[in-house]
Image (cartoon, coloured by chain):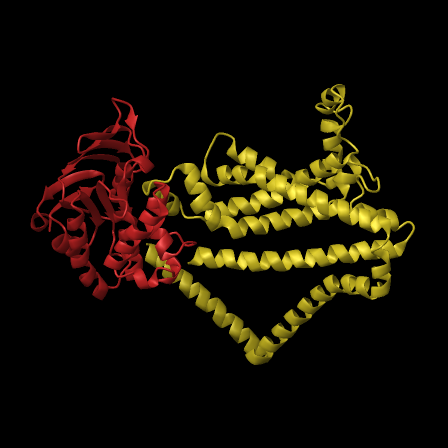
Chain colours: A yellow, B red
């Protein structure tokens, strides 16, 4: 029965292929010309897509002469934003890695009640509009927020401080790390863990000496993605932390503010961000390639 | 002596095994794919928990459901060679073999001497610095065995140790494997579905079918 169905399937496929060939023969298009036309069409589409992405970046560099960029680098707005962005993004990445690694490992290795729900909740900030994230954080940790009001009573204020910048960044960037780390842990063969245990290693020793080093490239790649996302964070930060130079004004916020006055400052900051983004992409690509190589081995 | 009397409910059938292996004896566990051979090894190693029963090794209880005893795998001191060998890919050959000694926090000088002895005995000293993933199949097998033997185990479990080797090398390794295991002088269970392994390596063999031992006897009897 099954073999009859398979034969019928093969006959149908052959008939369709013959019909298509016959149709092309009748309308007089040689197969070689068709192949060339297909390749040319694809090349055109690829060129259009590349141009669409590259054009704004090229325009950004063409409109920013090096001497203007160098001059703007000494502007206090640029320096404050750069310093604040690098400091908060670094701290954010550290927090995300420390908190996210155990979460990702548990998510990759264990099954528990409500796991699907927990995984969805972790991924939610990726698709949540940043402005919504900002207002949600304000409702939680703002002066009148459900947690913030109690902290406020103790004299602790979070909203519109540098701490708020970090909280906003952790909120939006943690899924980028946790998702990547979860995949990296899932890729580590359970047999390595079992082998380590039978050789006398405790769960903790196994995690630090076997699992973590094997998954390391993936974890670094995730941390870089989280760092880049923190560096580019805008919506949640401006809603929850405000826009105060030197305190909460990160690079994206400074670009937005400077657009209304000094365009050179905006361009300078934009070029710094584009350069960092490019370096991030290259690093992630190199590390991801290494991960695949390890997994293949 | 290793004494096993355990039960575990698996997806398709119930695993119910009762067997014993004497000191220095090699028991070949034979059966079709999916009959529960690897699961049985994992249960003995403590990587899975039985539903009920008892596992004891030279009088030391490793698992007893009635007494609520369940020694974790890291405290059982069992040498286990996995089917895929499970060599740590980020470590060198040397570090793989030294791993079990490092977990025991032995002095560095003792570790160096013991690893050197085992690597030289296995003909692996020259490649000690190579990454474990970059060596040949036969070398991987010897590394996995050296790693399992260096911890001075009280029991050896080998899961299809020759299946990843080509036919020519398998014939050579059977003799070598038998000698190495006998020199360790501990009970040993080897999982295989190759009757040539049963004939050349084993002292005794058991046939496992859908989780039950249906035949135990000499290698000739089972074949």
Q: Residue furthest front?
A: B109
Point 47% across, 59% down: residue: A293
On the image, the x and y values in percent for residue A82 come to 77, 49
Task: Judge whether A262 appears above or below A97 on screen.
Answer: below
Point 56% across, 33% down: residue: A117
On the image, the x and y values in percent for residue A232 come to 73, 48
Q: Nearer the viewer, residue B53 or A6?
A: B53
Lateral position of residue A23 relative to residue A255, left or right: left
On the image, the x and y values in percent for residue A188 come to 44, 48
- Quarter holding residue B47: top left
Point 70% across, 56% down: residue: A276
Lateral position of residue B196 relative to residue B144, left or right: left
On the image, the x and y values in percent for residue B105 come to 36, 41
Lateral position of residue A42 relative to residue A287, left or right: right
Task: Judge whether A46 appears above or below A37 on screen.
Answer: above
Viewport quadrant of the N terminus of chain B = top left
Lateral position of residue A242 relative to residue B150, left or right: right
Residue B77 makes an appearance in the image: yes
């Amino acid at each position: 029965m099954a073999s009859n169905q398979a034969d019928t399937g093969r006959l149908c496929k052959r008939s369709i292929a013959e019909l298509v060939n016959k149709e092309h023969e009748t309308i007089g298009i040689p197969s070689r010309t068709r192949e060339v036309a297909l390749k040319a069409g694809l090349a055109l589409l690829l060129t259009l897509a590349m141009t669409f992405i590259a054009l704004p970046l090229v325009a950004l560099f063409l409109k920013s002469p090096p001497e203007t960029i160098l001059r703007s680098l000494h502007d206090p707005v640029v320096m404050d934003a750069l310093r604040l962005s690098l400091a908060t993004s670094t701290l954010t990445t550290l927090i995300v890695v420390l908190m996210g690694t155990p979460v990702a490992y548990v998510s990759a290795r264990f099954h528990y009640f409500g796991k699907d729900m927990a995984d969805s909740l972790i991924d939610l900030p990726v698709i949540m509009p940043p402005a919504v994230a900002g207002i949600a954080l304000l409702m939680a940790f703002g002066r009148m927020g459900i947690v913030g009001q109690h902290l406020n009573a103790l004299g602790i204020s979070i909203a519109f401080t540098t701490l708020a910048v970090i909280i906003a960044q952790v909120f939006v960037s943690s899924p980028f790390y946790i998702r990547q780390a979860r995949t990296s842990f899932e890729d580590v063969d359970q047999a390595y863990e079992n082998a380590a245990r039978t050789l006398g290693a405790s769960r903790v020793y196994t995690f630090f000496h076997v699992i973590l080093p094997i998954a390391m490239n993936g974890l670094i790649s995730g941390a870089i993605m989280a760092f880049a996302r923190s560096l580019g964070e805008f919506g949640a930060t401006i809603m929850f932390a405000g826009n105060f130079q030197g305190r909460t004004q990160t690079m994206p916020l400074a670009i937005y503010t400077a657009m209304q006055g000094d365009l050179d400052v905006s361009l300078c900051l934009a070029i710094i961000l584009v350069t960092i983004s490019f370096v991030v992409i290259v690093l992630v690509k190199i590390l991801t390639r290494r991960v695949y190589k390890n997994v293949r081995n | 002596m290793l004494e096993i009397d355990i039960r575990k409910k698996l997806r398709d059938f119930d695993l119910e095994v009762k067997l014993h292996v004497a000191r220095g004896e090699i028991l070949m566990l034979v059966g079709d794919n999916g009959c529960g051979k690897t699961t049985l090894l994992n249960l003995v190693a403590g990587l899975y928990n039985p539903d009920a029963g008892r596992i004891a090794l030279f009088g030391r209880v490793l698992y007893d459901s009635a007494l609520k005893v369940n020694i974790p795998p890291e405290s059982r001191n069992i040498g286990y060679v996995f089917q895929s060998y499970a060599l740590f890919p980020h470590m060198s050959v040397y570090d793989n073999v030294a791993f079990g000694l490092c977990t025991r926090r032995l002095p560095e000088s003792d570790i160096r001497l013991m690893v050197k002895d085992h690597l030289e005995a296995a003909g692996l000293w020259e490649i000690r610095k190579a990454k474990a993933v970059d060596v040949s199949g036969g070398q991987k097998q010897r590394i996995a065995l050296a790693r399992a033997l260096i911890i001075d185990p009280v029991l050896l479990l080998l899961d299809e140790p020759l299946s990843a080797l080509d036919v020519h090398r398998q014939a050579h390794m059977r003799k070598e494997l038998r000698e190495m295991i006998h020199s360790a002088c501990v009970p040993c269970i080897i999982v295989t579905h190759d009757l040539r392994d049963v004939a050349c390596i084993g002292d005794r063999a058991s046939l496992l079918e859908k989780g039950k031992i249906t035949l135990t006897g000499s290698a000739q009897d089972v074949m």
